[in-house]
Amino acid sequence: MPNPVPMPTETIDSTPLTKKDFVTKNDVRWCPGCGDYAILNSIQRTFPELGIPRENFVVISGIGCSSRFPYYMETFGFHTIHGRAPTVATGVKTANPELSVWIITGDGDGLSIGGNHLFHLMRRNVNVNILLFNNRIYGLTKGQYSPTSAEGTRTKSTPMGSVDRPINPLRFALSAEASFVARTLDNNPKHMVETFKAAHAHKGLSFVEIFQNCVIFNDKTWDPVYGKENRAENVLFLQEDKPLLFGAENNKGITINQRLRPEIVTVGENGITEKDLIVHQSKDSDLLYPSMLAQLEYPKYPTVAGVIRAIERPTYEERVEQQIQDAQAKQGTGNLTDLLRGENHWTVE
C-alpha cells in the first residue's frame, strides 16, 4: 500500500515571547516617577512567562491614569468608559472563554462610579484578572479625594479634610466573596510578578490591589508602610503554610489572644515560639481568616502583602455554557429566524 501523501501543515511561530513583544510604539505618558511605570514593566515581564499566545491577551480599562494601560500593551484591548470595564470584560470572557482577560482600574474608577460593577463581577466569579491601582487619590482629574483616601486628607474637593471613612479594597473584595484576593506593591517588582502569576494561575476571578504612588497629587502616601526605612517592620509578606512573621530580624509574628484578637508577639520572648503563630492558609474557604488579614494595617499592625485568599469554585462562564448545553439537549439547537418571527407573522410581497 503506498504511503499517504503528507498534508500541508500551517507553520506556527514557536519563538518564545519576551517582554519586547508586549511593548508598543506608543509613548508612555505618565508623570516622571509615577508608580504606573513599575507596574507596566512588571506586567510586560509577566505575560511572556504565562505560556499564552499574544493574540489571546485582552487588556480592558475604564477611566483614569491607570486606564491608559491598553495603549501601552501590544495586545488586544479596550479603553472603556468610567467604571464600566467589568461589564465589557464579562462580555469578552463569556463570548470567548479561551482569552486571558486583564482589567486595569484605579481606586476611583473601580471603587467609586464602578464599585457596583466591580462588586457583581467578583461575586459572579468571572474568570478574569483585576488589577486595582490604589494611590488614594484621583490623579487624572488633578487631585480630588478618592474612596480610599485617609480621613482628614486635604484635597481640592476636601479643603478642610475628608470626613469619609475610606474603603479597604481587600475587605470590599472579600465582602463580594471573590475567590482570589491579593495585594502587592509598586516598589517591589519581584513580588508583583509573583503575584500576577498567581492571579493568572487561579481558575476564577482574581483581584489584586497594588499600592501605587502618585508623585504629583499624593506623593509618598505609602512610604510609612513600604518605604525603605519602614518596610521590614511594617509589611508582612504572606507565604503559604508558613507562620505570619515580619520585622527586621524576622522574629515578630501574629497570634490570636484570649480576646480572639490578632496580637503582635516576639519569637523568643515569654516562651513564644513559631508554633504559637498563625500559619497562613489562603485556601481556607471560610471568610473569617482572610477578613482578619485584610484588617491588619499600619500603624497598629503590619500591612499584609501577598495572596490572602485563593479558593476554587465554578466560574461564571462555565455555568452559563452548561445552561446552554442543557437547553440544547432538551430543546435542540433551535432556529434564530423562527424565534424572531414567532408563531404569528406575515410575509409581505
Image (spheres, rainbow, N blue to C red):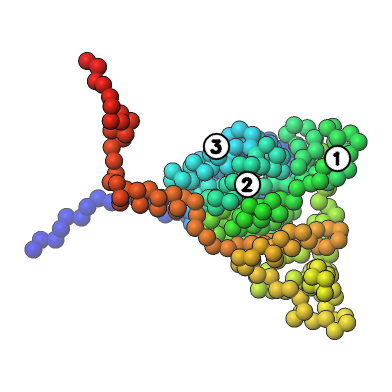
Label 3, on which residue?
Answer: 78
Give the amino acid at mark 2. Phe
Q: Residues within 10 Å of mark 1 (few under 14, many from 20)?
A: some
| Residue 257 is at least partly visible in this image | yes
Q: Which mark is residue 42?
A: none
- Of 270 and 72, the residue lying toward us: 270
Q: Quadrant of residue 214?
A: top right
Determine contact: label 1, label 2, CB under 8 Å: no
Q: Is residue 160 above or below residue 200?
A: above
Q: Is residue 331 above or below residue 160?
A: below
Label 1, on which residue?
Answer: 162
| Residue 72 is at least partly visible in this image | no
Label 2, on which residue?
Answer: 119
Residue 239: image location, x then y, percent: 68, 69
Q: Earlier in the sequence, mark 2 or mark 3?
A: 3
Determine contact: label 1, label 3, CB under 8 Å: no
Quadrant in which the C terminus appears: top left
Q: Residue furthest right?
A: 160
Q: Quadrant of residue 151?
A: top right
Q: Residue furthest left?
A: 1
- Of 305 and 327, the residue lying toward us: 327
Label 3 sits on a secondary structure element that is strand
Residue 200: image location, x then y, percent: 55, 56
Give the amino acid at mark 1. Ser
Q: Residue at x 74, y 71 (%)?
A: 244
